[in-house]
């Protein structure tokens, strides 16, 4: 059990002590949570594939934040092998496309938290895939995925109505219609980031206020089309706002 409390670096060091320790340290049950951010420059697709084969169904949380060498093929292998994954951070993995979300949709139905920030090739197809295969999704970050439009948001919220955290920062194509879909289908929403969503107006945000009464955090920085009317709507409909 001691090995299960060790981080990635320590486990790898222990694996070099002896054959017995190698077997114990590299047992998949010790690798339920992996953060590879500190090694981002060295991580390539084959590393992710090997990790997924080693950890299999034990892996619950993986961060590949900043690992720009990881692409769709590696993540398909990962999705096939690690079907119990719940938290996946792909922030800044600029090689991935909609194919990755299709793989996650097909194999990773237990996914709850997904960070796709700055994965700029992501489009509405990814959101549609997630809505079909990841119904437990509670947190989705698609900041700076500026190919996303209201059609993608509509598909997402119809299949993932339990969303609690949604970051749309920098999704500049989004209009009020997208917010109306969120307001209608995401009653559990607690945190919403709309920073620099330049096209939204009071109309869209008012529908959020009326449909998302559990809202605690709202960022609308840089949204120059909203007025003081929003403050009144927030005061009347979102008592938990901090």
Image (cartoon, helix red, strand yellow):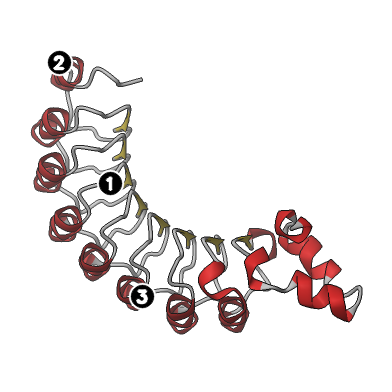
- Position of 125 compared to 18: left or right? left
Nearest the eye: 170 or 66: 66
- Position of 222 compared to 43: left or right? left
Which residue sits furthest front?
A: 1
Specify which label sits upstream in the sequence, 3 or 2: 3
The label nearer to you, 2 versus 1, is 1
- Position of 140 compared to 44: left or right? left
Indicate the quadrant where residue 108 lies.
Answer: bottom left
Q: Which residue is mark 2?
A: 236
Question: Label 1 near label 2: C-beta < 8 Å?
Answer: no
Residue 231 appears in the figure: yes
> Disc 2 on helix, strand or loop?
helix
Specify which label sits upstream in the sequence, 2 or 1: 1
The Cα atoms of the two marked residues, 3 and 2, are separated by 42 Å
Q: Is 24 placed above or below 176 here? A: below
Badge 2: residue crowd in 10 Å (few <14, some 14–19, many ≥20): few
- Position of 65 compared to 7: left or right? left
Q: Which residue is mark 3?
A: 107
Quadrant location of the C terminus in the rendered image:
top left
> Disc 1 on helix, strand or loop?
loop
Nearest the eye: 121 or 39: 39
The Cα atoms of the two marked residues, 3 and 1, are separated by 20 Å
**Can you give x and y, in whole percent of width and height, for residue 14 in the image?**
85, 68
**Can you give x and y, in whole percent of width and height, for residue 40 in the image?**
64, 66
Question: Label 2 near label 3: C-beta < 8 Å?
Answer: no
Q: Residue at x 12, y 60 (%)?
A: 151
């Amino acid at each position: 059990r001691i090995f299960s409390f060790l981080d990635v670096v320590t486990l790898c060091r222990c694996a070099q002590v002896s054959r017995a320790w190698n077997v114990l340290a590299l047992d998949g049950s010790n690798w339920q949570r992996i953060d590879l951010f500190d090694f981002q420059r060295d991580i390539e697709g084959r590393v992710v594939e090997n990790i997924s084969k080693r950890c299999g169904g034990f892996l619950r949380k993986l961060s590949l934040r900043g690992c720009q060498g990881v692409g769709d093929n590696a993540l398909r292998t990962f999705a096939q092998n690690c079907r119990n994954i719940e938290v996946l951070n792909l922030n800044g993995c600029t090689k991935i496309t909609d194919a990755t979300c299709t793989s996650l949709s097909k194999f990773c139905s237990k996914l709850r938290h997904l960070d796709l920030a700055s994965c700029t090739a992501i489009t509405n197809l990814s959101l549609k895939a997630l809505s079909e295969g990841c119904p437990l999704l509670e947190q989705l970050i698609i900041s700076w995925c500026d190919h996303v439009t209201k059609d993608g948001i509509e598909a997402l919220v119809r299949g993932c109505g339990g969303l609690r955290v949604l970051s749309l920062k920098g999704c500049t194509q989004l209009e009020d219609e997208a917010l109306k879909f969120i307001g209608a289908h995401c009653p559990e929403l607690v945190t919403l980031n709309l920073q620099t969503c330049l096209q939204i107006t009071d109309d869209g945000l008012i529908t959020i206020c009326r449909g998302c009464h559990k809202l605690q955090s709202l960022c609308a920085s840089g949204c120059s089309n909203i007025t003081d009317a929003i403050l009144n709507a927030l005061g009347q409909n979102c008592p938990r706002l901090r």
